[in-house]
Image: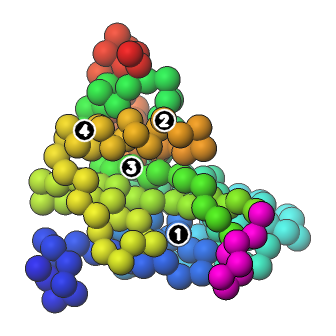
Amino acid sequence: MDMNGLPNGIYHEKQVKELCALHALNNLFQSRDAFTKAELDEICQSLSPHVWINPHKSLLGLGNYDVNVIMAALQRKGCEAIWFDKRKSPECLQLNHIRGFILNVPSDYRLGFVLLPLRKRHWIAIRKIAGLYYNLDSKLDAPNVIGQESELKRYLREQLDSKEKELFIVVSKLVEEAHLWEHDHNTCIKR
């Protein structure tokens, strides 16, 4: 345990406002300083420089960043986000070439204890730390152990069975260019 009570010195940011994309990125890179809200806001501005209402974040400026912001942020760190086609099996993933995952899941809007009839999206980081894969969801009190490679692939299959969830694979630019993150096409077909 580390001084924060987390196993293996795992860095885990908890949810503040609508900053789950920021938390997912910092949890993925295991650093409080990987990104700041100001950096993500600047990315939003650079993606849509001449608009009054930026389409890449919430109207109130509290976060709720979209995938374009996450992809641009990852590129600043020499990484790429690859959308994973649900028609493929997680068995095709070359995990030794993958830095981590970002999962996008539906989330409910709440006003206090009242559940509103609106849906928003939530970003979750998943990565390997000290030989085990962890769910680093900022809404969790602590990281959740997923397990080893076989448990991770089972977990990803379960998540991808939902039509509303999307998975992004985070790899280095070199891995993306050489397509090293995936086995050949025949092992990737879902059975």
Marks 4 and 1: in contact by CB < 8 Å? no
- Residue 38 appears in view: no
The quarter of the rendered structure image containing the N terminus is: bottom left
Look at 29% across and 27% down and name the residue there: 91
Marked residue nearer the N-terminal end (3 or 1) = 1
| Number of numbered callouts drawn | 4
Q: CA distance from mark 1 to mark 4?
A: 24 Å
Marks 2 and 4: in contact by CB < 8 Å? no
Q: CA distance from mark 4 to mark 2?
A: 20 Å
Bin the neighbour count of mark 2 within 10 Å (Cα to Cα): few under 14, some 14-19, many 20 and up. few
Marks 3 and 2: in contact by CB < 8 Å? no
What amino acid type should be assigned to the residue bearing mark 3? Phe
Q: Position of residue 48 (x, y in %)?
A: 77, 60
Dot 4 falls on a residue whose secondary structure is: helix
Dot 3 falls on a residue whose secondary structure is: strand
Dot 1 falls on a residue whose secondary structure is: helix
Look at 23% across and 43% down and name the residue there: 151
Tell me the residue that label 2 is attached to. 161
Say whether residue 112 is magenta: yes
Tell me the residue that label 4 is attached to. 95
Tell me the residue that label 3 is attached to. 101
Q: Main secondary structure of the magenta part?
A: strand
- Residue 10 appears in view: yes
State which mark lies toward you, 4 or 2. Answer: 2
Residue at the bottom extreme of this rendering: 3
Which segment is the magenta one?
A: 110-117
